[in-house]
Image (tube, helix red, strand yellow):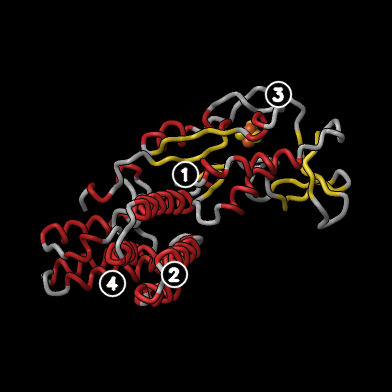
Amino acid sequence: MSDKKQTNTPIAIGISSCLLGEKVRFDTGHKNNDYITKTLSQYFQFRGFCPEVSIGLGIPREPIRLVTDTIDGEVRCIGTKTPELDVTDKLTQCGKDQLDWVKTLSGYIFKKDSPSCGMERVKVYYKNNPKRNGVGLFASVITQHCPNLPTEEEGRLGDAMLRENFIKRVFLYHRWQQLIGSNPSKKQLVRFHAQHKLIYMSHNQSKTRKLGQLVAKIGEFEQNDYCEQYLQQVTDILSKPATRKNNTNVLKHIQGYLKRQLDTDDKQELEETIEQYRTGLVPLIVPITILKHHFRKFPDQYIDDSLYMQPHPQELMLRNQL
Ligand code: SF4
């Protein structure tokens, strides 16, 4: 698979700035994440932002937390020592004020557990008892207003499956942004679908079929409506990581493109490797490497154009643990 399919323009990712090692936390500390600053920074251009500093809370500052007066009631963000310090409206407005630049990004990585930046399971205090069912106020505005923007918490990037899924979504979304920015023809939009169809299949086959019906009717749509619906459906398909079962089905589907080219031994080896992947004996990278080897000898235009076997740079080694 040639590298020409990977984008050459910088991929901008928003990020809670403490994760970049910036000393912006309430206690003047940071939460540098080595995987982000040493590995991902080679591929992404990070745009750090600290909402709490942005609304004028200093460094150091009194910690803030989410509270509610009634179960399932309104959640507000106040000082842990000074309840009169209520920054709910300021944090919400801060999120809204950032939307112009955030909408140009290809992804966002949030700091977990933060009453400002956490995406899920943030502590909400009711009568001093915390319940982990809250969302950081800044993160909430960003995810609500940018529903198709790939977002993730740094803590979840430690999980191989979630990490691969997030980075795959970022690269795919960036390719989509580039395509849309180039005022594409209907033919180019259909080609984008063909390039990504096997990726979608590895996530959800029935939703991919439904998406295929939308693509087949592209001529009936006003282009903006088509693009909006297409992206919404893609976001939904990719919201859950690809499964081993679906990846196995896709690998077998790809294998079908070689049925006339491979001799009996090669066919058997490929089948056995896909079966070893299915049962968890080898990671996804193993059958993919064998398939790539065969397609180098027996090229196929559809498979060569597809991004399934290389949705992100190989050097990130994201499929070595799947
Ligand atoms: S508000 Fe967000 S960026 Fe700022 S220190 Fe807290 S988690 Fe980090």
Among the two numbered marks 3 and 4 on one chain, the one whose residue lies closer to the N terminus = 3
**Which amino acid type is shown beneath numbered disc 1?**
Leu
Q: Position of residue 198 (x, y in %)?
A: 33, 66
Compared with 22, 10 (above or below) is below
Q: Which residue is mark 2?
A: 204
Report the Cα–Cα distance between label 3 and label 4: 57 Å
Q: Which residue is mark 4?
A: 253
**Which amino acid type is shown beneath numbered disc 2?**
Asn
Q: Position of residue 258 (x, y in %)?
A: 17, 70
Query: 215 or 151, which is in the foreground?
Result: 215
Among the two numbered marks 2 and 1 on one chain, the one whose residue lies closer to the N terminus = 1
Q: Is residue 112 visible?
A: yes
Report the Cα–Cα distance between label 1 and label 4: 34 Å
Q: How dense is the environment of label 3, judged by Cα within 10 Å: few (below 14), some, or many (20 and up)? A: some
Among the two numbered marks 3 and 2 on one chain, the one whose residue lies closer to the N terminus = 3
Residue at 34%, 66% (x, y): give it.
Answer: 197
Of badges 2 and 1, nearer the viewer stands 1
Report the Cα–Cα distance between label 1 and label 3: 27 Å
Element class at badge 2: loop
